[in-house]
Amino acid sequence: MHDYLRNGLRERGFLPAEDPDTRLTLGDKYEILDNIGHDLPSLLLEPEFRSYLRGQTLPEWPHPNIPPVLLPQARLYYLRLGFIASGYINQIGQPVTHSLPANIARPLCKITELLGRPPILSYDGYALFNWKRFDPTRGIELGNIDTLQNFVHLYDEHWFILVHVEIEAHAARIIDAILTLEEDNSFADQEAVDNCLEQISSAMDNILQVLRRIPDKMSDELYFSRFRPYIGQFRDVTYESMGQTVNFRGETGAQSSVMPTLVEFMKIPHQPNRLISHLNDMRHYMPREHVIWLDAVRELPDVRPVASRERFNQVLEQMAEFREVHYHWAIKYIARRCNDPQGTGGTPYLKWLKYLIDETRQHQVRG
C-alpha cells in the first residue's frame, strides 16, 4: 500500500490527518462563504433565501489544482458550497426547484472535479470535514467536538453529525490493526491474525457504544422534519451554465468507509443484487484515497482460514450488531413517520439492512 495511505489513515482513520480548517483564508472575497455558512440556519427560514443567494457573487477556487498545503482549505470551500447548494435545492417550506443557479453551480462543480467527486454535499463534507475540537489536547470525542456548519438552529443536528465523527475516530484502530498485519506479512500466523481481530473488536465495542447514543440528544421528530430533508438526493436538477441535469445520491452514512473496510477485510460474500450495486455506487461519493484503500484491502489475503473461530465470529457479530442498531434507528427516526421509507441516498434501506445482517452472520465459522 502507498505510504501516504499508511501515514494518513493510521492515526485518524478516514478523518483528515489534521483538524479541519475553521475559516477560509484564501483572500477577502472568500469571507462571503464563511458568512453565508454562519448565517445559513437563519437564512433557510426566510422565503427570500433563494432570491438572496442568486444575487450573491460566490468566488471560484483560485487555482487550477489543489496544492497539498491548501487541501484543508479546499475541503472547507467544498463544505460551504455543498451546504449552500443542498440548502437551496431542498429548502423546507418552499416550492420544489430543479435548478441550481450558475453562481453556486460553477464553483461547486470546479472544486468537486478537483476533489474527484460528484458536485453535491456528501458524507465527507457533512461529517468527515465538519468538526473542530474545543481542547486540541483532548481526543476527537463527544463533549470535545462541535460542527463547523449546520442547516438548522438545533443541537440535534450537531449531535447527529458528531456521533459519526467520533465513530470515525475510533475506526482508526481498525485501520491500524489491518496495516500492522499487512506490514508484518503475518496473514498465516494465527496469533497475529487473532491480535488483529482483537484490536478490531475493541474498536467496534467503542463504535457500538457511540452509535447507541444517537437518541441521547437527537429527537426523532426534529430529525425527520427539520434537518433530514436538507441531506436528500438531487432529482433531475439542472446545474445552470454547466449544461447538465443530474441525479445524485443524498448524504448518507453508507458513504462512510468504515463498514466497507470490514466487509473487504473479512471477505463477506454479499450476494450480487441491487443493494450491492447501490453500496458500490456509494464509493463514487467517497474521497479518492478512501476508495484506493478499500481496493487495497480487498486484495489482502483471507484471514478466515487462519483465525480462531471465536475471534473471527466476534467481529462478524459486532458488524451485525452495528447494522441492527442502525436498523433500529432507521425505524425509529424514519420508517414510523412515512409510508414509503427511503434512505437519504434514495434506497429501500430496511429491506437491504436486513440482507446485510443475515449475510454477515452467515459468514461465521461453524463449529
Image (tube, rainbow, N blue to C red):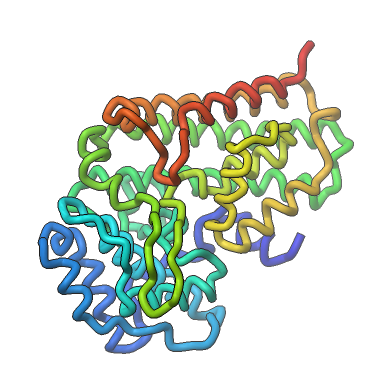
The C terminus lies in which quarter of the figure?
top right
Please state the horizontal and vertical placement of residue 230, each as a whole percent of the image. 29, 52
At x 36% / y 26%, what residue is drawn? 331
At x 59% / y 29%, what residue is drawn? 356
Residue that protrudes farthest toward the top in the picture: 367
Q: State whether residue 205 is above or below residue 295.
A: above
Is 248 left or right of 201, judged from the image as shown? left
Q: State whether residue 31 is above or below residue 197.
A: below
- Camera-side residue of 177 and 250: 250
Please state the horizontal and vertical placement of residue 242, each as a whole percent of the image. 43, 77
Q: State whether residue 290 is above or below residue 119.
A: above
Is 54 left or right of 342, judged from the image as shown? left
Residue that protrudes farthest toward the right in the picture: 188
The N terminus lies in which quarter of the figure?
bottom right
How many numbered marks have been drawn onto this rendered protein structure? 0
Q: Quadrant for residue 336, please give it.
A: top left
Is 12 left or right of 267, judged from the image as shown? left
Please state the horizontal and vertical placement of residue 334, each as a whole percent of the image. 33, 32
Please state the horizontal and vertical placement of residue 228, each as a whole percent of the image. 30, 45
Q: Is residue 148 something that shows in the picture?
A: no
Q: Is residue 171 something that shows in the picture?
A: yes
- Camera-side residue of 177 and 53: 53
